[in-house]
């Protein structure tokens, strides 16, 4: 691999000083003169018809400046399938749905006025279970007009409605070979059901927006989102405003993980601002974020595998059922994208998959770190260990035998390139000393080790545009809209720009994302920023470099191809002639010709069409990044308590732009993965969320992750030929294999196999009792 000057170096984050000194500004911090405060009234019913709304009491309340209901809201809907009004108009479909909103001089005044709004409801039958809802001729239809809704146009197949099953938003099939014949040829067939619950993103910063009506009738929205251009497009559509009159500004974000892609908060703030003609700030409470913050969907996975006695996979069938909740949100995309978690790692000659997103009367769900891959890999990697146990094969060896090799086609027909799964697996198992027996603990504690591998794809067919300007002092200004969300994206982009211009990172300035200033980007989603925005940035830099060399060649009387650029100096290759970049700005002739050095770069991720019925396509994703986890746990067989005491993560992100930032993403993924594996679950009772706060919703703390010296993050750099300098997107990937690795370690320690996340101590203890007759005595691993 080529030697780089800045790429591959762990330079400090470009935003570190602002954040540690408290100077970093988030939209939730902003206040403006004359600003009002918004609050939202929410439905107490899972499914009901709105009979009558009386807002007269609230409108007369002191300090109230505006009240809006569904009748005041735009007729246009939001969502990938446009199925939701920003305020319910005729029907509410989940407990917590926004029904009305108030703008007042203070938060307290707005909250008090909410109680003065009187709404009469006619309660309707509701359905909460996705498998019940997807049955033919379901007694409860969540959206009777589903087939008439407008659908967001996409460059690949997604929407497959089934009239006989009207609660199915999306059905995504994949077919390869003949699974029935594959099962007939198999020596053993394994069939199991796994599940993963609803999870909350648990961002420190609450969902918020500050909407400002402009004198010309336009709108500026300070929006805590990572998809600002998408939000701008929706605001234009909702309020019938021209793009030139809508501006979305996104400052620092206090976490998102996919949870701030929803439109409801900025849309309601904008509706109130346009009505009152004053700035309106809307900040959800923590309970509201739980209710209407597009949490991760729950998923049930049925998996059936046929194998030879040597562990070779011959056939696999997977049926994934996603409980999307009351509105489609981005879960329609999750239903498709989750399938790639099942595609990109193993060689399976006969494969059948069906993924469904199903409408029910629970809170709406959406994108979550991993974009569905985490849940399906939970099932696959648990079952791989179950197969190994039954066959008497080492779990490491069964994976080695089935991992795709370079150049092989995966089950969708995409040729495998740059696959680092094997290298990752070898690194983590070496670190955790896989072949050594775990240390013996005194009763009641038992130790065990577990491994799992996974992948995270980079979304295809999305566009990034980057603009670059070089100033007279050779400083570089980068304008892009792939928002920094805490992952270090701006630092990585600054390193790319510095590498292209042969300078240091401190000479690069990243402009804050603002649709009036920064060009289009599909957003910080699906591990795409490094790959897509990074490539666009390189193209923009190369555009400016060409301009510099063309201008310098006239001065130096030498061909542009013979010039190089380092630290603000233009060099003649192999010679001693130089000139400063700043010298290009001094002649009056240059000012007359152009005035500044700017360039733009556009990159669109590749996509080759795929068959809607089989999912077969030569390039359904931009790239895959692979990784592995090896964990060691301690289990208290008297209480069921599980402690993760050691973890090794290795991920192949191609050429790492900044290794320390990559390690940070793996460690962050580990913490989130431990939460999903052992603690986190949004609990519903008849559609009502019973734990909408951090007192009752259990998140891991620093005490629940392994100690500093017992966590190892490793890199397997297998470069991708199309990524910037060989880099791949991977930040979501640190999460995807954690839960099955922990489950497999628990089994190694106790013989207990849990199939439903989270693996709580109650579940472990119950299973221990069932296989032993009493706690603490293990019969066998079988």
Image (cartoon, rainbow, N blue to C red):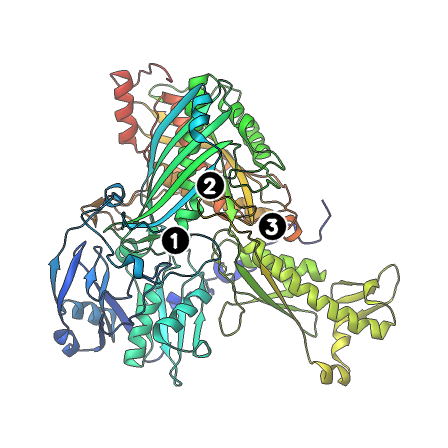
Q: Position of residue 552 (x, y in %)?
A: 80, 72
Q: Nearer the viewer, residue 737 or 146?
A: 146
Note whether 124 is above or below 671 in the view shown: below
Q: Is residue 524 left or right of residue 95?
A: right
* Quarter-of-image position of residue 683: top left
* Label 2 packing within 10 angstroms: few (<14), some (14-19), many (20+): many
Question: In the rendered structure, which disc, 2 or 3, sits on the residue that comes first in sequence?
Answer: 2
In the rendering, which numbered label is found on residue 508? none
The residue at which mark 2 appears reads as: 341
Which residue is situated farthest in the top direction here? 779
The residue at which mark 1 appears reads as: 159
* Quarter-of-image position of residue 66: bottom left
Cα separation, mark 2 vs mark 3, equals 25 Å
Closer to the eye: label 2 or 1: 1
Closer to the eye: label 3 or 1: 1
Question: In the rendered structure, which disc, 3 or 1, sits on the residue that comes first in sequence?
Answer: 1
Q: Residue at x 62, y 62 (%)?
A: 537
The residue at which mark 3 appears reads as: 658
Q: Position of residue 88 (x, y in %)?
A: 23, 64
- Secondary structure beneath disc 2? helix
- Secondary structure beneath disc 3? loop
């Amino acid at each position: 691999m080529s030697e780089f000057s800045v790429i591959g170096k762990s330079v400090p984050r470009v935003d570190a000083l602002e954040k540690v000194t408290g100077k970093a500004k988030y939209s939730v911090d902003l206040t403006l003169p004359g600003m009002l405060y918004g609050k939202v009234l929410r439905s107490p019913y899972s499914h009901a018809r709105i009979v009558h709304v009386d807002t007269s009491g609230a409108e007369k309340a002191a300090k109230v400046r505006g009240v809006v209901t569904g009748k005041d809201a735009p007729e246009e809907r939001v969502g990938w399938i446009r199925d939701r009004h920003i305020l319910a108009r005729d029907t509410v479909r989940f407990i917590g749905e926004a029904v009305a909103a108030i703008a007042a001089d203070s938060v307290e005044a707005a909250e008090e006025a909410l109680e003065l709004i009187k709404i009469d409801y006619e309660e309707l039958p509701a359905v909460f279970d996705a498998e019940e809802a997807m049955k033919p001729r379901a007694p409860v239809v969540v959206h009777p007009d589903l087939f008439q809704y407008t659908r967001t146009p996409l460059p690949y197949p997604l929407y497959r409605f089934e009239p006989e099953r009207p609660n199915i938003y999306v059905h995504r099939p994949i077919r390869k070979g003949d699974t029935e014949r594959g099962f007939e040829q198999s020596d053993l067939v394994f069939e199991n059901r796994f599940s993963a619950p609803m999870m909350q993103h648990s961002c420190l910063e609450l969902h918020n927006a500050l909407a400002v009506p402009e004198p010309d009738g336009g709108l500026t929205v300070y929006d805590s989102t990572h998809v600002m251009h998408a939000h701008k497009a929706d605001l234009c559509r909702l309020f019938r405003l021209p793009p030139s009159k809508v501006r979305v500004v996104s400052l620092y974000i206090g976490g998102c993980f996919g949870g701030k892609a929803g439109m409801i908060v900025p849309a309601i703030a904008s509706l109130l601002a346009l009505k009152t003609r004053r700035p309106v700030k809307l900040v959800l409470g923590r309970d509201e974020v739980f209710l209407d913050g597009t949490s991760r969907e729950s998923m049930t996975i049925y998996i059936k595998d046929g194998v030879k006695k040597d562990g070779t996979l011959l056939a696999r069938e997977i049926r994934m059922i996603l409980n999307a909740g009351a509105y489609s949100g981005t879960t329609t995309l999750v239903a498709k994208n989750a399938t790639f978690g099942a595609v990109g790692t193993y060689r399976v000659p006969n494969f059948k998959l069906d993924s469904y997103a199903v409408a029910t009367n629970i809170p709406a769900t959406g994108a979550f770190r991993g974009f569905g891959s985490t849940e399906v890999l939970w099932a696959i990697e648990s079952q791989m260990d179950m197969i190994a146990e039954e066959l008497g094969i080492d779990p490491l060896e069964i994976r080695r035998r089935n991992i795709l090799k370079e150049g092989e086609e995966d089950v969708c027909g995409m040729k495998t390139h740059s696959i680092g799964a094997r290298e990752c697996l070898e690194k983590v198992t070496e670190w955790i000393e896989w072949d050594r027996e775990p240390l013996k603990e005194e009763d009641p504690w038992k130790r065990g080790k577990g491994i799992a591998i996974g992948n995270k794809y980079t979304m295809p067919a999305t566009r990034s545009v980057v603009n670059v300007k070089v100033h007279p002092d050779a400083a570089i200004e980068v304008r892009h809209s792939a928002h920094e969300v805490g992952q270090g994206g701006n630092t990585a982009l600054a390193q790319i720009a510095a590498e292209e211009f042969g300078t240091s990172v401190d000479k690069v300035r990243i402009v804050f994302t603002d649709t009036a200033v920064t060009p289009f980007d599909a957003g910080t989603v699906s591990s795409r920023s490094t790959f897509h925005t990074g490539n666009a940035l390189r193209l923009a830099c190369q555009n400016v470099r060409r301009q510099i060399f063309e201008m310098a060649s006239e001065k130096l009387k030498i061909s542009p191809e013979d010039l190089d650029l380092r630290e603000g100096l233009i060099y003649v290759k192999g010679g001693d002639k130089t000139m400063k970049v700043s010298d290009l700005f001094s002649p009056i002739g240059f000012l007359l010709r152009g005035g500044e050095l700017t360039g733009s770069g556009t990159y669109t991720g590749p996509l080759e069409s795929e068959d809607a019925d089989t999912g077969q396509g030569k390039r359904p994703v931009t790239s895959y990044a692979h990784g592995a986890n090896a964990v060691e746990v301690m289990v208290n067989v008297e209480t069921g308590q599980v402690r993760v005491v050691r973890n090794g993560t290795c991920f192949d992100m191609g050429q790492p732009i900044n290794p320390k930032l990559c390690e940070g993403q793996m460690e962050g993924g580990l913490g989130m993965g431990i939460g999903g594996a052992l603690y986190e679950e949004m609990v519903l009772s008849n559609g009502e969320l019973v734990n909408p706060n951090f007192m009752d919703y259990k998140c891991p703390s620093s005490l629940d992750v392994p100690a500093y010296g017992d966590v190892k993050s490793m890199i397997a750099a297998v470069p991708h030929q199309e990524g910037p300098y060989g880099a791949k997107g991977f930040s979501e990937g640190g999460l995807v294999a954690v839960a099955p690795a922990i489950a497999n370690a628990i089994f190694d320690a106790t013989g207990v196999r849990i199939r439903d996340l989270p693996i709580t101590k109650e579940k472990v203890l119950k299973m221990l009792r069932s296989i032993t007759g009493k706690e603490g005595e293990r019969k066998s691993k079988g």
